[in-house]
Amino acid sequence: MPITWSARATQTISAAAMSALLLASAMKHFREPAFFHQVVPEFLCRDDSGTRPNGPCAVMTRDEWVAVSGLIEAGAAVGLLVPATRKAAAVGITAMFTAFLAGHVDALRRAYGPAGTPAQRQVHTARLPLQVPLIIWAWSLRKPAPRSHTLRRAAGGPVAGLPA
């Protein structure tokens, strides 16, 4: 007996997979925040040491940005699991991944700068293009899957539009 997947089941599994990915990433934000430090653009980071002036966008420290983005990812993961909030969560995640492009581009620029290392170049060269499929995947979750309908013949009669 063949197994058939409805569009709704496929979308639910896809949303659950994206949710699991976001939860794993959110946990990593708190377990290994240094992993994310390089993708937080410098102009967003407040420096409380006084060694450099803070710009108008430097409202949080690097650690605070990493923690906030981890919390946002965790909330978005939960939002994907609830069908009523899935569309809003998918649009928000798409925007989040798109905004993360700026951090990945900045990290790549610094990796290829004078202070960059071969390991940083390798990591950031791989991380930047990975954002594109994540953006496409998140965007695909915004539309509700069509409901599948089972066509049955009532008492052996024809189904409308189908041959008997």
Image (cartoon, helix red, strand yellow):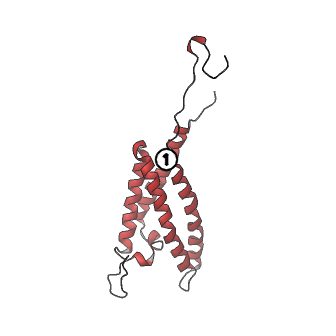
Up the image or down, 22 lies above or below 127; here it is above
Question: Which quadrant of the view contains residue 128?
Answer: bottom right
Question: Which quadrant of the view contains residue 36?
Answer: bottom left
Question: Which quadrant of the view contains residue 25?
Answer: bottom left
Point out the image quarter for the C terminus: top right
Outermost residue to the front: 161
Is residue 67 or residue 139 the one in the foreground?
A: 139
Residue type at numbered disc 1: Ala
| Residue 148: image location, x then y, percent | 54, 32
Up the image or down, 162 lies above or below 104; here it is above
Residue drawn at point x = 55 percent, y = 78 percent:
109
Residue drawn at point x = 50 percent, y = 71 percent:
102
Residue drawn at point x = 52 percent, y = 67 percent:
101
Outermost residue to the top: 155
Point out the image quarter for the N terminus: top right
Is residue 62 or residue 160 the one in the foreground?
A: 160
Q: Which residue is mark 1?
A: 15
Is residue 162 or residue 25 the one in the foreground?
A: 162
